[in-house]
Image (cartoon, rainbow, N blue to C red):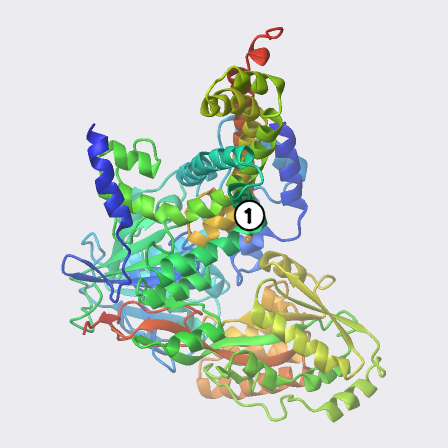
Amino acid sequence: MKLARLLPCLLVLLATPTAPLDAFERVGDRKILVFAGRQEVPTIDPSVKYDWSIRMMQQALYDALVKYVGNPPEIVPWLAERWESSPDARTWTFHLVKNARFHNGDPVTAEAVRWSFARTLKLNQGPAWMLSDFLKEDGIKVVNEHSVQFTLTQPYAPFLSFVPWWYVMNPRQVTANEQGGDLGQKWLTDNEAGSGPFKIKRWQQGVLYEIEAVDAYWKGWPSKDHVGGVILKLVRESAAQRAALLRGEADIVEGLSADDFDQVAKTPGIVVPNFPGMTTFGLKMNTQKPPTSDANLRKAIAHAFDYDALLKIYNGNAVLQTSPFPNATRGHVPVPGLPRQDLARAKEFLAKSAYASGGTELEYVYVQGLEEERKMGLVLIDNLGKLNLKVKMVPLTWPNMVARGAKVESSPDLMAVFATPVSTDPDAVAYQYHKNSWGKYYGSSFYTNADVWGLIERARMLARWEDRAPLYADVQKRIAADAPEVFGMLANRRWGMRDHVKGFVFSPVRFTGEVDLYPLAIVAK
Amino acid sequence: MLFGLLCLTFVISHVVPGDPARLAAGPDANAAMVETIRTKYGLDRPLAAQFARYVRGLAVGDFGESLRSRNAVRDDLARYFPNTFELVALALLLAVAVGLPLGMLSAVYKDTWIDHGARVVSVSGVALPAFWLGLMLQLVIALWLGWLPLGGRLGLTATSPAPITHLLLVDAVLRGEWRTFADALRHAVLPVVTLCVPALASIMRVNRAEMLETLQQDYITTARAQGFPDFRVVTRYALRNAMIPTLAMIGLRYGWMLGGTILVETVFDWPGIGLYAVNAAVSSDFQPIMGVTLLIGLNFMLANLLVDLAYGWLDPRIRRPGAT
């Protein structure tokens, strides 16, 4: 009987149309920003993993000693108010601010910094690779409650450029939640122990992640209209993301296609920030296995490729690479003579190669489902056909592609690779061409040049930028001359954003899709 | 049978190209970090040893650990399966509730406009790909008309009721949270319809064919000659006999729908095991893939067992061999 009375009410509720919204969510007096993203946040443990969505949340929940801000990216003081390094770049001392507090009220101390770095090194996951060759646990010393000193095993000038990704955790909270000596890994998967501008409100794995602004954030807020919280809602289909933005169900979306971005940009109430990023796109060529082990064939390919087609694929929202290093990388110099389409030169190089009349087939491997990479393959077929070279397009899932590129025997002739360096220091890009990067997806060229490796090793150990800069200029020229890849373009980073979202600060060192949530504000009309 | 499925899935997931340790360690990880992961998860051991370890774990209800999230797969399955079950159950109920009468009507009014209309529905239902139908429903119903949400399980600021059964709709009813119930139901409409259409079409087609055959039987002619009302003849005598193959189809459809949720859950961001399996597959995270496969296999077997039992309930000749 009761149910019978309730049924009509339910029907009314169901029949009520979900009216398109034109604003953010409100919870009490808080303005909640809705970010529709395609990628999950499987863990937020700062010592275990990072990618764009993980790091966006880590950056919101945790603080590091320093932070990357702006375009061009600058390293600014954060938990550390100042720092100094020894003349040989071996010893780095950071002095902490005195008012920083973890979310549970504990002070952020030098011991917490030491413990956090030691934990990441011990677990040897996530960001550990950035420093593990130079920093050992016993090299981290607490000088006093607010000063911590890092003594590296050898001089390493890029040290500071990686520190922004090493977040500081509250040791007391983490150790209290250890399970079987796991250093709190299980607990930190979906709990946090940070001092960042946000704390967790809801963590519904696979559905949404809601964080809430810490009103009394120790560093204060840049705007009185700062967001009261952020909901990262998983919307996996780009068509649904676009629809969510148009309907006003999302305030920010990432990862739309080039055409979709252009279309939503024309919609009133929506803005599309558009900035050149640091992600390079190149066609990595296997330099150790025929036919692309032939340097002249590689140069012929590089000169036959239609670079303007790359820009067209992205509707003009990209810039061509002028060096193996992205433009925002410190020490970037344009390399004269970096290949552009020139069929006559391509034929000259081909004539010098072991494949003078072409007639061979090259395998082009790309990520299945990535339309832009498929189009690039079609461009290759057309361009290399003029040299009588055939191209076989092989779409693979990302794991299979990484597996193919991990060994010289299986690495394809041409592999479409987007690579985002994690720091603005040139070492982060240069090292991709070092033998120690073989086996990684961006090392699938298996590039070999002992002179270049020597330069890279020397440059990372020099403390003074004046000494390092010429070495990196040389490295860029030498790599370009060896043509281990077709140096392509830097695609612009774009987001679809409701125009009431203010305070967006772009920094190219962040990953594709990643947004710094701290400066965001909502200014309702 | 389940053990066969276990062996097959284990071998397939381990021989496909891809290095789960490298993927779990991250794109920039050095060789030492990859080896740390490989050793931790026993990926450096021979395949037979890995299999033995996995089976030993299963014996105590341990489905392993996800390399991607480091969560126990058992916990993940417990979190996601109720959502999938709810989606499939609603879709199946709708398919049966609409497909059965439609098949019956189509047979009774053979070659009339009702029959033609029903057949158009059934052919379209079988032919339309689920992801396309889902996207079209999103476009028209959610985006253009704005009647229903685009996806998800609940509104952004809505909170789930405290779990009792872990089935959101059921828990909302049990807790008396009617607004949450309505919200969850509204979010369920489009994915349920998308998932239900192919099943509805199959059930309708099978039921129509069986009804047509049954309605030609002598006992139906006899019943009609004795003056029984047509409604009673059709629903009580014909439908019951025509139901046995239809029931087999419903059982099969339950299993297929569990597998079919992969596409529907992806389109509608429905946090179920289909979506979980997709995310695991693209990361070569094989323990969740194994867990999902076993769970679907187990459900398939249970559904078939229930169908077998239902045969006996429907047909006394099966329940009591020799009965006429």
The part of the image, by quadrant, that contains residue A403 is bottom right
**Label 1 amino acid?**
Val
Residue A159 point in image, percent of width and height: 43, 71
- The residue that appears at 54% across and 27% down in the rendered structure is B247
**Count of labels in the image:** 1
Front residue of A445 and B163: B163
From the viewer's perspective, is B84 left or right of B24?
A: left
Front residue of B314 and B288: B314
From the viewer's perspective, is B271 left or right of A374?
A: left
Residue A180 point in image, percent of width and height: 40, 38
Q: Which residue is mark 1?
A: B120
Q: Is residue A122 visible?
A: no
Quadrant location of the N terminus of chain A in the rendered image: top left
Residue A83's place in the image compared with A400, above or below, is below
Helix, strand or loop under label 1:
helix
- The residue that appears at 52% across and 56% down in the rendered structure is B132
Residue B117 point in image, percent of width and height: 52, 46
Front residue of A271 and B101: B101
Residue B173's place in the image compared with A512, above or below, is above
Other residues around mark 1 within 10 Å, as few (<14) / some (14–19) / many (≥20):
few
Front residue of B35 and B41: B41
Residue A444 point in image, percent of width and height: 65, 67
From the viewer's perspective, is B127 left or right of B60?
A: right
From the viewer's perspective, is B118 left or right of A198?
A: right
